[in-house]
Image (cartoon, rainbow, N blue to C red):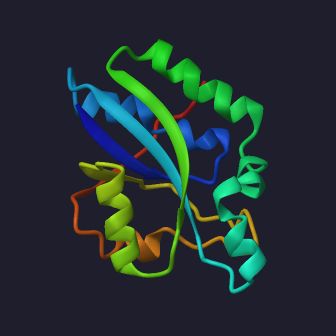
Amino acid sequence: MATVLMPSNFENDSFACIPELVETFPGMPLKVLLFHPFGLSSSITDLLMLSRRNKEENLVSFDFYRKCLALEQEYPQITGVNWTCFYGTTLVAFKNFLKANSVDFVVSPATYRYKSIGKLSQNPSLFLEKCPLPVISLTPMELA
């Protein structure tokens, strides 16, 4: 099984390249991890509350969560579709994030456009440009 990391704004357009991903790796079990990077606050209160993740959980709609579950049913090759947030500003922190999540490679949708979803939101391309893992660019198909 391969774990695939993919940048996301936690909107339904994040799923557009899933069919292309499945076609690119036929028969390979895939775990898809959608992520969005956030810088760390300098507020001690924010840092103490970081483990609660309540602010970021509000950024993920029920419809988005439901679509993650539906993709697991639609594509048997996909063993899981999850979302997470990366907190950090350095490449070292990003490398640790990749290792902690057992990421095998990164998919960068060719049409992905960064959109800030919070006050500490960061552009994932800053990390993907220097990613130590293979970064595969996919052109998403049109969703029906």
Rendering coords of residue 68 (x, y %):
57, 29
Q: For residue 28, which quarter of the picture?
A: top left
Rendering coords of residue 79 (x, y %):
37, 23
Q: Residue furthest bottom?
A: 42
Residue lying at 41% horizontally and 17% vertically, measured from the top left: 75
Rendered position, 11 above or below 89:
above
Residue lying at 53% horizontally and 37% vertically, measured from the top left: 15
Rendering coords of residue 38 (x, y %):
60, 69
Q: Tell me the quarter of the image containing the C terminus.
A: top right
Residue lying at 31% horizontally and 68% vertically, measured from the top left: 95
Residue lying at 49% horizontally and 13% vertically, measured from the top left: 73
Q: How many marks?
A: 0
Observer-nearest of 31 and 18: 31
Observer-nearest of 11 and 39: 39
Q: Tell me the quarter of the image containing the N terminus.
A: top left
Q: For residue 135, which quarter of the picture?
A: bottom left
Question: In this rendering, would 141 be left or right of 104?
Answer: right
Rendering coords of residue 94 (x, y %):
39, 69
Question: In this rendering, would 13 be left or right of 1?
Answer: right
Question: In this rendering, would 36 be left or right of 98?
Answer: right
Q: For residue 93, which quarter of the picture?
A: bottom left
